[in-house]
Image (tube, rainbow, N blue to C red):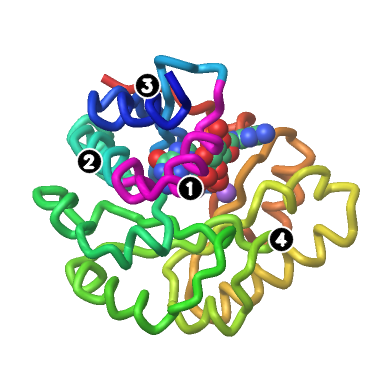
Amino acid sequence: ASSRERLGSVIDGRLLGIVYQPIVDLADGSLLGVEALARFPTEPERGPDLWFEEAHRVARGAELELLAIELAGARLAMLPPHAYLALNVSPATILCGSLAARLAGVPLARVVLEITEHAPIGEYAALADALAPLRAAGLRLAIDDAGSGYASFRHILQLQPDIIKLDRSLIRDIDSDAGRRALAAALTGFAKATACRVVAEGIETPAELATLRALGVDAGQGWLLGRPAAIG
Ligand code: G
Ligand code: G
Ligand code: MN
Ligand code: NA
């Protein structure tokens, strides 16, 4: 079968696995939440990034993203009661209009939507409008991959996120790389000035963790703190 057909079978058969990676408080190590990450059990050697790219290319991106959101949302009750569930979503999927329906029954006060910076967002005002009712119901918004993508500080400001996630390309070797450290410090300063929390992604070493703590980063995620794993 072609890759397009295989993608169709995954979506139509709902053959998606979800793993959950811990997000921890850097001050005391407590669990704040988990990020849901899609896995493709029928072809595990092909990474999720390729599946999502393909799905967007053949106009099934929103369907695939919404399936992952629905499957992860159904497991929210299995998380520790105080933990939030972070769900990845692209701007295009938010604008397609069926996100609220897919989140029906999910307590929005426990959901963080991670919007990737990797695609040009374009319609910031439309995006903010589409998110407003969900946010009024308690949903929080995170800018994912900050520092590596297209969003300018002005655009981030316009969306008024609750959380900024520092991209893992900034975190790698941050203890020895002064440029990455300066950029992470600038993003952290911006976040604090706008009452936003900062989460660092991709923490792999104790030296990276210590540097992020010293910069005042609130929370972290990465193999050092916990690998993505199935629950339930
Ligand atoms: O889990 P991993 O690091 O291999 O994921 C690689 C990329 O695949 C992520 O950075 C993200 O872009 C994409 N991805 C993984 N899971 C999801 C998901 O549930 N929804 C969306 N929209 N993208 C995902
Ligand atoms: O949605 P986002 O692009 O942030 O996806 C996060 C990706 O980063 C997932 O694919 C996850 O498997 C991956 N990841 C999480 N922690 C680490 C880490 O410590 N190191 C590396 N290399 N990848 C990580
Ligand atoms: Mn993410
Ligand atoms: Na990221």
Q: Magenta region: which residues? A: 46-65
Q: Read off the residue under disc 1.
A: 57
Alpha carbon of mark 1 to alpha carbon of mark 2: how far? Answer: 22 Å
- At which x and y percent is residue 173? 83, 44
| Helix, strand or loop for disc 3 | loop
Decide which of tag 1 and tag 3 comes sooner along the chain: 1
* Distance Cα–Cα, label 1 vs label 4: 39 Å
Mark number displayed over residue 70: 2
**Amino acid type shown at disc 4:** Leu
Q: Mark 1 or mark 3: which is in front?
A: 1
- Which kind of residue does numbered mark 1 sit on? Arg
SS label for mark 2: helix
Q: Is residue 55 magenta?
A: yes
Q: Is residue 76 above or below residue 47?
A: below
Q: Is residue 231 visible?
A: yes
Give the image location of residue 115, x and y in percent.
45, 60
Local crowd at mark 1 within 10 Å, few (<14), some, or many (≥20)? few
Residue at label 4?
A: 215
**Contact, CB < 8 Å: mark 2 with mark 4?**
no
Q: Which mark is residue 230?
A: 3
The disc, 1 or 2, on the residue closer to the chain's N-terminal end is: 1
Indicate the quadrant where residue 41 lies: top left
